[in-house]
């Protein structure tokens, strides 16, 4: 098992290396002057030359890439042209919002989808099954930013239970931070919970039809014990697969949701950097997003081995 995980880590690190090469080539090597893109067509030649020197564009591309990668290992990601502060400091501040938001959203996804999918499969054709199917259809059809706007209208403007926008920071207290993240997390979670509900329901139905479940029931195992002891653990492997695949969608959805709720997270930083053509920030934000996706896939791989003994024996 350890060897399999070590090989998987090596593969994912190689993937991250290839992503860094692709990002570097697209932003700094392909035709077009990055400094001219950032300053615009009306930039003065001396200003353009100063920015090119600041960004190291007067050096060979290989040296620039090695400098960027080596800087990532020590936390030196360069200086933002727009904000005038180190990019690493910007990213650390924004991750303090985005990571809790993603964790809260994923917690909501699992808390909603897994029980609902299991109960819908166990009571196929009944009211809870129809309700789960309706929830899945609506959740998939409605985009998360629209859900966010509806939540603001209801819970912020009408009921005044939650703030409509902004984030006071964790210095104001844990509850204050969570209070500001609840509505964005719900907006992020609902579409993904709808997808996971359908996957969980289908996976549980498939396992319910297996021979070992009928054998357990024939030996006198109660329906609920057979469901939670035998069916659900075996149905979790495809569920874990989908959970790992949902992390990129949470990141992409976070770009929209953070801007709807004006949260100072990574998604808002990415959109602002694109609008301001701050390529130094953009390439590092892309690498952070890629690292989060790769980490989520590594956790999913470890979960496979823990859930399925057949995979452990094969490993």
Image: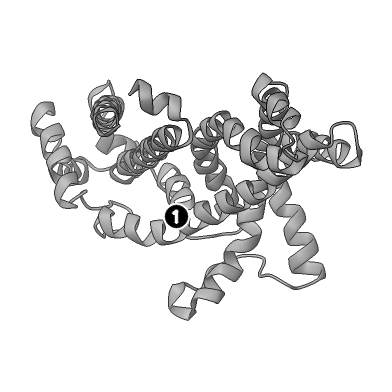
Which residue is depicted at the point 28% across and 28% down? Answer: 4
- Residue 184 horizontal side relative to residue 309, left or right: right
- Residue 70 horizontal side relative to residue 48, left or right: left
Residue 138 in sight: no
237 lies above or below 192: above
Name the residue furthest bottom.
172
Which residue is depicted at the point 91% across and 40% down? Answer: 127
Residue 177 in sight: yes
Give whichever of 190, 223 is nearer the camera. 223
Secondary element at tag 1 = helix
Give whichever of 31, 222 is nearer the camera. 222
Give whichever of 105, 1 is nearer the camera. 1
Give whichever of 277, 190 is nearer the camera. 190
- Residue 13 horizontal side relative to residue 268, left or right: left
Q: Residues within 10 Å of mark 1 (few under 14, many from 20)?
A: some
The residue singled out by tag 1 in the image is 99
Q: Quadrant of residue 286?
A: top left
Say which quadrant the N terminus sits in: top left
């Amino acid at each position: 098992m350890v060897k399999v995980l070590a090989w998987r880590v090596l593969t994912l690190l190689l993937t991250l290396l290839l992503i860094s090469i692709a990002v570097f080539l697209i932003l700094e090597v392909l035709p077009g002057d990055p400094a001219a893109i950032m300053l615009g067509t009306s930039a003065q030649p001396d200003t353009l030359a100063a920015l090119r020197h600041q960004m190291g564009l007067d050096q060979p591309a290989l040296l620039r890439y090695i400098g960027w990668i080596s800087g990532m290992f020590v936390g030196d990601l360069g200086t933002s042209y727009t904000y005038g502060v180190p990019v690493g400091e910007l990213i650390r501040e924004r991750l303090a919002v985005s990571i809790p938001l993603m964790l809260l959203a994923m917690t909501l996804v699992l808390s909603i989808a897994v029980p609902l999918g299991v109960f819908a499969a166990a009571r196929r054709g009944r009211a809870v099954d129809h309700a789960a199917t309706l929830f899945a259809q609506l959740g998939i059809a409605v985009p998360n930013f629209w859900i966010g706007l509806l939540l603001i209208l209801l819970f912020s403007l009408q009921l005044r239970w939650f703030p409509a926008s902004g984030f006071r920071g964790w210095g104001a207290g844990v509850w204050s931070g969570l209070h500001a993240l609840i509505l964005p997390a719900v907006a992020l979670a609902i579409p993904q919970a709808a997808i996971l509900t359908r996957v969980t329901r289908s996976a549980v139905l498939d396992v319910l039809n297996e021979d070992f479940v009928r054998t357990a029931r024939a030996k006198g195992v109660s329906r609920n014990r057979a469901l939670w002891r035998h069916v659900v653990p075996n149905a979790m492997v495809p569920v874990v697969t989908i959970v790992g695949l949902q992390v990129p969608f949470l990141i992409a959805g976070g770009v929209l949701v953070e801007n709807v709720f004006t949260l100072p997270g990574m998604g808002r930083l990415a959109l602002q950097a694109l609008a301001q053509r701050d390529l130094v920030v953009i390439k590092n934000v892309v690498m952070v997003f890629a690292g989060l996706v790769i980490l989520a896939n590594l956790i999913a791989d470890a979960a496979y081995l823990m859930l399925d003994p057949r995979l452990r024996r094969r490993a």
